[in-house]
Image (cartoon, grey):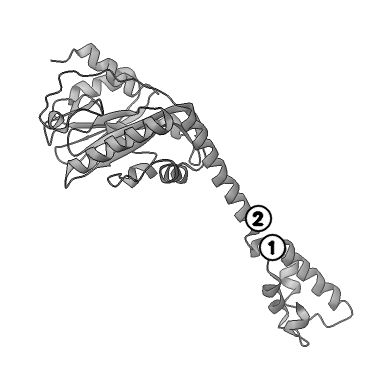
Amino acid sequence: MLDEKWLESQWLTHCGDGFPRDILLWGRGHPQRFSAYNVEHFLQLIWKYLFTFSIAVNVFPHSFLSSASETLCNKIYLDLDSKADITLAYNDMQHLVDYLKGKFNYVPRVYFSGNKGFHIFLDLPSVMLSNYRDTMIQFVTKYLPPIKTLDIQTLKDRNRVSRLPYTIHQGSGRLCAPIDYATELSILLNNKLNKYPNIVIDSNMEFSKILCDIDQEISDKKVDEEEVRPSHNKIRPCILVAQNQSMNDSNGALMRLAVAIEYLYTHHNPKDIAPLFKNQDDYDYNKSL
């Protein structure tokens, strides 16, 4: 039997980046979601539902998601799941940890979900990301080996929940718990862990730097694309009116030049500008270029 105070210390370590954060309960009827406003409220809710529901919590507290466009990120959450054969997720988990040890000299937090998969957390010093979804996808694509059992939706969703460690999966009856990644699968499936480890948050600065670099590259690319993207909204109303008028009088040449310069300034291609003058009596495509 696990000590209550010790259990609480593990739950609070897992959620050590703060409250409020959501708690999701499922296993009896429709899933239920509550917001735990502080430590006391959180522990009250967990003890109330511990033995009757499967319990998950937000990966990030609400304060990390306060902006619609920015995310304060202190972890990379990877959900490996294989409903058909847990061996596939188990092999992916071990391969990934071996890779991280060799590439980054880093061992992530690994939790057995209690059912058909594993939760992996790569902890890092907090960084502000403006492109959370794309940054995570690029990190996994460029810096990790192929992971066939990775649930890509959990990677994209900053509001995702993950199973709370040291709670029971009500479907399988097994314990969700942090594990040594080398633990034999049969031991996990038969609830025969001899030792329940403490949850340890080991932050890796290199992950923070990589995420910042990826996020900045994505932001820079968006700026570049915006600068070269033609937009009629950037054309002044006086030019839009002028291009629909006759430009055959004494000032016509100057007006045509003004129209062309306006469109060139907004990064339109000359081949696309020439047809703008086809409503003129003397229109000649080649001369308009």
Q: Residue furthest right?
A: 250
Q: Amino acid at mark 1?
A: His
Answer with left or right where residue 166 lies relative to residue 286: left
**Relative height, residue 288 to residue 225 (above, below):** below
Answer with left or right where residue 37 lies relative to residue 273: left
Answer with left or right where residue 48 lies relative to residue 39: left
Question: Residue 240 appears at what percent x and percent y?
Answer: 71, 70
Q: Amino acid at mark 2?
A: Glu
**Relative height, residue 276 to residue 226 (above, below):** below
Q: Quadrant of residue 258?
A: bottom right
Q: Quadrant of residue 178?
A: top left
Question: Residue 153 appears at what percent x and percent y?
Answer: 33, 46
The reply to whether callout 1 and callout 2 are in contact (CB within 8 Å) is: yes
Element at badge 1? loop
- The answer to whether residue 243 is visible is yes
Q: Quadrant of the N terminus?
A: top left
Q: Which residue is mark 2?
A: 227
Q: Quadrant of the C terminus?
A: bottom right
Please tell me which residue lies in front, 205 or 91. Answer: 91
Q: Label 1 to label 2, Cα distance in Å?
A: 8 Å
Please tell me which residue lies in front, 218 or 171. Answer: 218
Q: Which residue is mark 1?
A: 267
Q: Which label is found at residue 242?
A: none
Q: Name the residue: 60% across, 46% down.
A: 220
**Relative height, residue 175 to residue 214 (above, below):** above
Please tell me which residue lies in front, 83 or 72. Answer: 83
